[in-house]
Image (cartoon, helix red, strand yellow):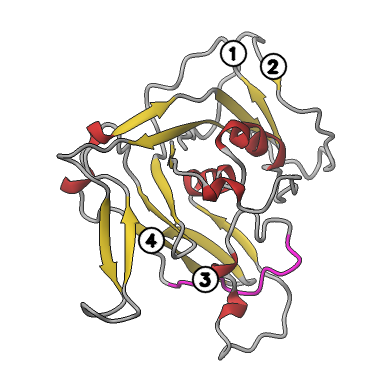
Amino acid sequence: MSSKGKGKSKEGKDHKKSTASLQQTISTDEEPKNLGFLYTIDALEALYDEKHPRRTVMVGGTKGSTDVYHLWFPPIRAKMFRRQKGNLYRWRAGVSQLLEDYRRPEKSYQVASVFFQAKQDNFLAVFKDCTKCDIADEIPGWTQIGFHHHSGYMSEVDIAGERDLLAAPANGSTWMPQVIPEVYNYDKNPALRFTGQSGGLCGKLSLLIAMAAFSAEVRNAENVVATCFGLGIWRKHQFEIGIGRMSDYVYFEK
């Protein structure tokens, strides 16, 4: 999926359409002033032919070993993607609005191309537009996401983060496991002991929007992000958990 985040968004003509009827649950005193960004979500389809077949990488052992996985990786050439352009939205203080008569920003402050690796149940990403540059020329290229751990049991999602798991269990949180697959949960490491509260999630905006989009099928991704991406919370949706991660689409975030 592709989404463009642009910090503060300027007011223009009131040509906008609400994508959801959302009630504000915070007071005006608590609401951060001028908190907003623009974003788009594009679905990318990987293209293959005899010259450019599907890429697989052998991981997990030596040749002939029973623990070798042939994992699919996204293409590394820009011409090997077909883009399905999404709409432009403005998020502000917990509410998203569809901007029908606005052009996409010429400058992208955050860009990430993201896909889901089904065998590993995890995300891989790159902070580049994979439809405009060859990932083969980028260092690093497609890389697993991870987390930086902060005080207060906060997990900051990032490409090639310091840790593979969350800083604290996410059981009972609003965003687990719709946004983050169970494989990233703190409790997946049986050697860890934790008696504190459930942790929180933050990080690169482009990655957060992409992972949220993956929680639903392509046709519902925009509506899910617009409806569920709240102010400090994730509003659970009714779709099957991880249904978008079962598709063959690669997702791109701007």
The answer to which of marks 4 and 3 sits earlier in the sequence is 4
Mark 3 or mark 2, which is nearer the start of the sequence?
2
Q: What residue type is labelled 2?
A: Lys
Magenta segment main secondary structure: loop
| Pair 4/1: label in front | 4
Of marks 2 and 3, the one in the foreground: 2
Q: Name the residue under label 3.
A: 149
| Residue with the mark numbered 2 | 17
At a point 72% along the width and 51% down the height, the residue shown is 233
Disc 2 from disc 3: Cα separation: 38 Å
Camera-side mark, 4 or 3: 4
User: Label 4 sits on what residue type?
Assistant: Gln
Answer with the quarter of the image where residue 222 lies: top right
Residue located 57% across and 56% down the image: 202
Numbered disc total: 4
Label 3 is placed on what type of residue?
Answer: His
Q: Separation of disc 3 and disc 1 at Cα?
A: 39 Å
Look at discs 3 and 1 and give the one toward the viewer.
1
Which mark is first along the chain, 1 or 2? 2
Q: Name the residue under label 4.
A: 144
Mark 2 or mark 4: whose residue is earlier in sequence? 2
Q: Could you tell me how far apart the alpha carbons at marks 2 and 1 are, in whole angstroms?
A: 7 Å
Vertical arrangement, residue 142 with respect to residue 188, above or below: above
Nearest to N terminus: mark 3 or mark 1:
1
Residue type (three-letter) at the residue carrying disc 1:
Glu
Q: Mark 1 points at which residue?
A: 100
Q: What element carries label 1?
A: loop
Answer whether residue 166 is magenta in the image: yes
As helix, strand or loop, the secondary structure at mark 3 comes to strand
Where residue 39 appears, x then y in whole percent? 52, 31
